[in-house]
Amino acid sequence: EIVLTQSPGTLSLSPGERATLSCRASQSVSSSYLAWYQQKPGQAPRLLIYGASSRATGIPDRFSGSGSGTDFTLTISRLEPEDFAVYYCQQYGSSPTFGQGTKVEIK
Amino acid sequence: QVQLVQSGAEVKKPGASVKVSCKASGYTFTSYGISWVRQAPGQGLEWMGWISAYNGNTNYAQKLQGRVTMTTDTSTSTAYMELRSLRSDDTAVYYCARDLNSIAARPKAFDYWGQGTLVTVSS
């Protein structure tokens, strides 16, 4: 099983700031089968990024993904009030697994 | 528009079974696989398994092998997840989620999600 470790656990930022979230895999993720999701309290997760860097339908371009192999990054260029949430990475190169999440909170 | 509508909340005793349904609409059901993902209270996401609505092939998480069964009814565009021998640590919100890519041979990223079904296991 591929273990995904997200850092930091919590990110305290102000609206308008840049957020950089990390996801590290215990072994290489094949074909960059890495996705990012946003989850708000009481809601289902929402797909943001798939294939490490492709934005899902309707996702604003302030969200971007990068990386390959074992190191991946989600960047939110300028935080909007609605972006404060928990973010999960997921690999689907083998049996899917999720990271433990990064909470982006208002500073 | 694509929708996945799940069945309502359940309360079960330890050792019992639960079966959660996920009714799909707005797309060709047999063209996409469905995964089930659960989330214990205050915790992260755990992938449970996947079923191809195209041919019924399944792929279960190793830790749940033998306790979980996923099925589909193509006549009603509904996916089902049954979990047996319930324990207290099975208390969670259970989500169904659709594959991003059609006719996939294995689970992918998930572009549409159900609203979640809370399953509470308590004596």
Image: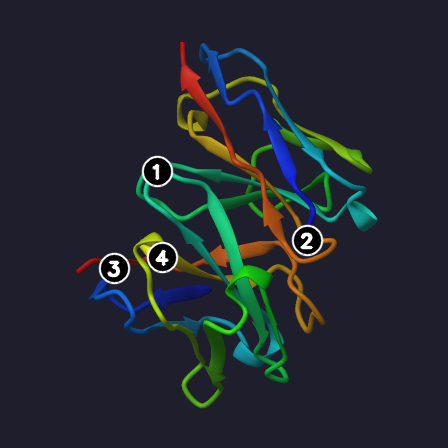
Amino acid residing under circle 4: Asp
Image quadrant in which you'd find residue B38: bottom left
Name the chain letter of the residue that bears numbered label 4.
B
Q: Which of B48 and A60 is in front in this view?
A: B48
The answer to whether dots 2 and 3 both sit on one chain is no
Q: Position of residue A57 (x, y in %)?
A: 59, 48
How far apart, in angstroms, are the residues tagged by discs 3 and 1? 16 Å
Residue bearing the label numbered 1: B42
Check contact, mark 4 vs mark 3: CB within 8 A. Answer: yes
Q: Are marks 4 and 1 on the same chain?
A: yes
Amino acid type shown at disc 1: Gly
Residue tagged 4: B90
Q: How crowded is mark 4: few (under 14 residues within 10 Å), some or many (20 or more)?
A: some
User: What is the x, y in percent for residue A40?
Assistant: 38, 36
Indicate which disc, 4 or 3, sits on the residue closer to the N terminus. 4
Give the Cα separation between the discs numbered 1 and 2: 24 Å
Q: Report the residue at 20% width, 58% height from top.
A: B122
